[in-house]
Image: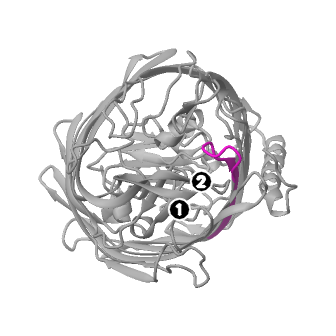
């Protein structure tokens, strides 16, 4: 992959990383054991996402932080989370991986950045990467199941919230930070990240930077298929190298009752598109965030949280000739205000208001949607009650949404999108959930809700060839809101040395917006001046049902000088289009995992086995994926360096070099990009 000479902005991540590392080294030399420095602000252990009342949630959730996040970290958000209960990834090669939750993806899984909207184009197409990098995050929270009450219909499947400390939430009065380097893996990753925090007198600041370089992904030897034709056998995924970098600065004023602050960050990603061997995507995103919290005592009002974000996103699809084929741009604004209160209807509650605006444009030969404007405003309320031992919540959310299409440009040579048009929607969502302690160790949870989602702009107005799916996609401007009813039941057991969680759920859609084959073919122009036929797919409303089970547990087998822990998990989902009787596409099969972790003093080691069964339940036009068993291992060693804590780690992935494919990937890329092959990677994390 060729790169142009870096401009001044491209050097910002390296400059930030160098500055942080230099400051870390200087601090480590100047500090002594008698004067221990503050660590980077630790985020609260209580689940933050979807939990404004800080209680036990009535639906499934997972949290990654600390050493667990460090050892699990992958180049993309989807790959980092893949394998958590109910979570998979879209796996459009190693660069474009959006999380899927309980069989739902795209605009049904909400991606958040510190509880604010993450604006990019990853929901539009599988080959568009998520504009977030896990390298500098402190914590990732995953909420499985509908979270529409707090975050809108885009959270029908769940929420992924990436948390950092770019706006310090507590006062920082000493210099602290973290640096990390990584090398190896199936894509020959070379990465470095660093962050630095400091402050005095309640005024705190934060700076971070990162860079990651990868080569074409190595896999077990396989025979790629393109348009049904076999290609030469290879052990590389073509055109899958990437170069990613980013940086941020932030500051806040904080005291015991809250904080107010702002941050700016930049993100750049240049990566190959596997389905197009000579196409590279150049992505850029800038964001400004303003956030604050304030606790109030002695009144009905307990506290207020507010967050505003402004994002500018752009990516260019560059042909092998160097010409820009298509340019996508998005400008997004989101504002969210929450007020916590007590003693009105229940024991406590939260009232909120949220507004979002998104302007999208696509210019070029591969633009299959018109320029659009989306506006949304919502009010919501969540109230908590307690009856004897039962703690339960009731919530309601009302939205107003408007989606506008600019139609064809006046000078369009090939009109496709018609006249300008607009649609309005009024989604309404409600839920009730409860938690009941059964004993000191056992508890049961339940949640019942009704969710509505306004159609996305591409579901309404798409009309063109979508290369990522190799299909001609047509939207339907007459679509109504997507409607679903969901039931979630949970059973939890927790002791000091062991724990077990079981979650069963069913989601019934009376109107599921699905991309369905129409049975027709459409003639499209080829680059060589000819034409070819591609299948036509149409967005339409169908009835659908998704039901599944998630099991997750751990147990301490040995305690003493040696500590030995066993962990395991299982998840399975069955998803059906009830109108056609066909399975829904891109559904993960039954997955089983088993892990064994040992700790002795400063040393820790672990091995994990993940088995994925064959996925033979696929819709017409798709292909089955075979079963696979992947074995991975890791070892880490902690030590004290002067005033800093060091963690050395070594990972071996896919030790058996098993050839495996992702059932949740679209067929166009699945047959070109298996999962990574055998690899070894190493890294060092330094905290001070």
Residue at (24% x, 33% y) in the render: 441
Position of the N terminus, as image quadrant, is top right
- At label 2, counting other C-alpha atoms closer than 10 Å, the crowd grade (few under 14, some 14-19, many 20 or more) is many
Q: Quadrant of residue 355?
A: bottom left
> Which element carries disc 1, helix, strand or loop?
loop
Circle 2 sits on which residue?
132
Main SS of the magenta segment?
Answer: strand
Residue 139: image x %, image y %?
A: 53, 47
The range drawn in magenta is 262-280
Q: Residue at x 51, y 42 (%)?
A: 668
> Which comes before the other along the chain, label 1 or label 2?
1
Q: Nearer the viewer, residue 643 or 291?
A: 291
Whether residue 587 is situated above or below residue 292 in the rendered picture: above
Residue drawn at (74%, 39%), measured in percent from left and top?
643
Give the CA distance from mark 1 to mark 2: 8 Å
Judge left or right: residue 624 versus residue 687.
Answer: left
Look at the numbered discs 1 and 2 and tell me whether their residues touch, using CB distance below 8 Å: yes
- Which residue is located at x 34 percent, y 63 percent? 153
Position above or below: 1 against 594: below
Q: Who is closer to the viewer here, 221 or 202? A: 221
């Amino acid at each position: 992959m060729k790169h142009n000479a870096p401009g001044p902005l491209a050097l910002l991540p390296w400059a930030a990383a160098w500055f942080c590392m230099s400051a870390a080294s200087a601090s480590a030399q100047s500090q002594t054991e008698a004067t221990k420095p503050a660590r980077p602000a630790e985020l609260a252990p209580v689940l933050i996402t979807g939990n404004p009342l800080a209680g036990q949630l009535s639906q499934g959730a997972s949290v990654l932080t600390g050493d667990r996040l460090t050892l699990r970290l992958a180049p993309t958000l989807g790959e980092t989370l893949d394998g958590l209960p109910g979570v998979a990834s879209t796996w459009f090669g190693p660069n474009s991986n959006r999380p899927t939750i309980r069989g739902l993806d795209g605009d049904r899984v909400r991606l958040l950045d510190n509880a604010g909207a993450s604006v990019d184009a990853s929901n539009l197409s599988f080959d568009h990467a998520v504009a977030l990098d896990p390298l500098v995050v402190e914590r990732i929270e995953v909420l499985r199941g509908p979270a529409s009450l707090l975050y809108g219909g885009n959270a029908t499947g769940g929420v992924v919230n990436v948390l950092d400390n770019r706006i310090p939430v507590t006062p920082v009065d000493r210099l602290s930070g973290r640096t990390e380097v990584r090398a190896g893996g199936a894509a020959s990753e070379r990465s470095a990240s660093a962050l630095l925090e400091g402050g005095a007198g309640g005024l705190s600041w934060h700076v971070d930077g990162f860079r990651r370089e990868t080569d074409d992904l190595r896999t077990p030897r396989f025979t790629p298929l393109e348009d049904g034709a076999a290609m030469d056998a290879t052990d590389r995924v073509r055109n899958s190298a990437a170069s990613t970098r980013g940086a941020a600065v932030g500051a806040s004023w904080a005291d015991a009752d809250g904080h107010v602050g702002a941050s700016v960050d930049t993100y750049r990603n240049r990566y190959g598109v596997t389905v197009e061997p000579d196409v590279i995507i150049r992505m850029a995103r800038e964001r400004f965030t303003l956030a604050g919290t304030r606790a109030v005592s002695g009144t009905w009002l307990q506290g207020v949280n507010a967050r505003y974000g402004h994002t500018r996103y752009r990516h260019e699809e560059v042909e092998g000739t160097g010409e820009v084929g298509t340019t996508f741009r998005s400008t997004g604004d989101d504002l969210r205000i929450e007020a916590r209160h007590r003693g009105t209807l229940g024991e406590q509650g939260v009232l909120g208001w949220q507004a979002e605006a998104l302007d999208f444009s696509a210019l070029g030969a591969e633009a299959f949607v018109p320029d659009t404007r989306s506006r949304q405003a919502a009010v919501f309320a969540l109230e908590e009650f307690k009856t004897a031992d039962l703690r339960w919540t009731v919530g309601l959310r009302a939205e107003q949404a408007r989606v506008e299409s600019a139609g064809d440009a006046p000078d369009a040579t090939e009109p496709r999108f018609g006249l300008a048009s607009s649609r309005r929607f009024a989604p309404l969502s409600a839920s009730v959930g409860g938690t009941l302690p059964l004993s000191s160790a056992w508890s049961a949870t339940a949640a019942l809700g009704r969710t509505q989602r306004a159609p996305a702009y591409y579901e309404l107005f798409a009309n063109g060839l979508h290369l990522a799916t190799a299909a001609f996609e047509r939207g339907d401007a007459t679509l109504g809101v997507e409607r679903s009813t969901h039931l979630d039941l949970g059973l939890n057991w927790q002791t000091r040395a062991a724990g077990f969680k079981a979650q069963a759920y069913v989601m019934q859609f009376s109107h599921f917006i699905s991309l369905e084959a129409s049975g027709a073919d459409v003639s499209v122009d080829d680059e060589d001046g000819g034409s070819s036929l591609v299948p036509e797919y149409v967005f339409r409303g169908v009835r659908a049902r998704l039901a599944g089970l998630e099991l997750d547990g751990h147990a301490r087998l040995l305690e003493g000088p040696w500590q030995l822990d066993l962990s395991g998990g299982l998840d399975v989902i069955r998803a059906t289009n009830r109108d056609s009787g066909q399975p829904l596409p891109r559904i993960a099969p039954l997955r089983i995992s088993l892990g064994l972790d040992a700790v002795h003093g400063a040393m820790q080691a672990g091995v994990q086995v993940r088995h994925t069964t064959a996925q033979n339940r696929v819709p017409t036009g798709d292909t089955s994926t075979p079963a696979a068993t992947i074995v991975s291992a890791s070892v880490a060693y902690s030590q004290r360096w002067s005033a800093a804590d060091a963690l050395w780690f070594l990972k071996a992935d896919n030790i058996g070099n098993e050839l495996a494919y992702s059932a949740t990937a679209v067929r166009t890329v699945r047959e070109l990009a298996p999962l990574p092959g055998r690899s070894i990677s190493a890294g060092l994390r330094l905290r001070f």
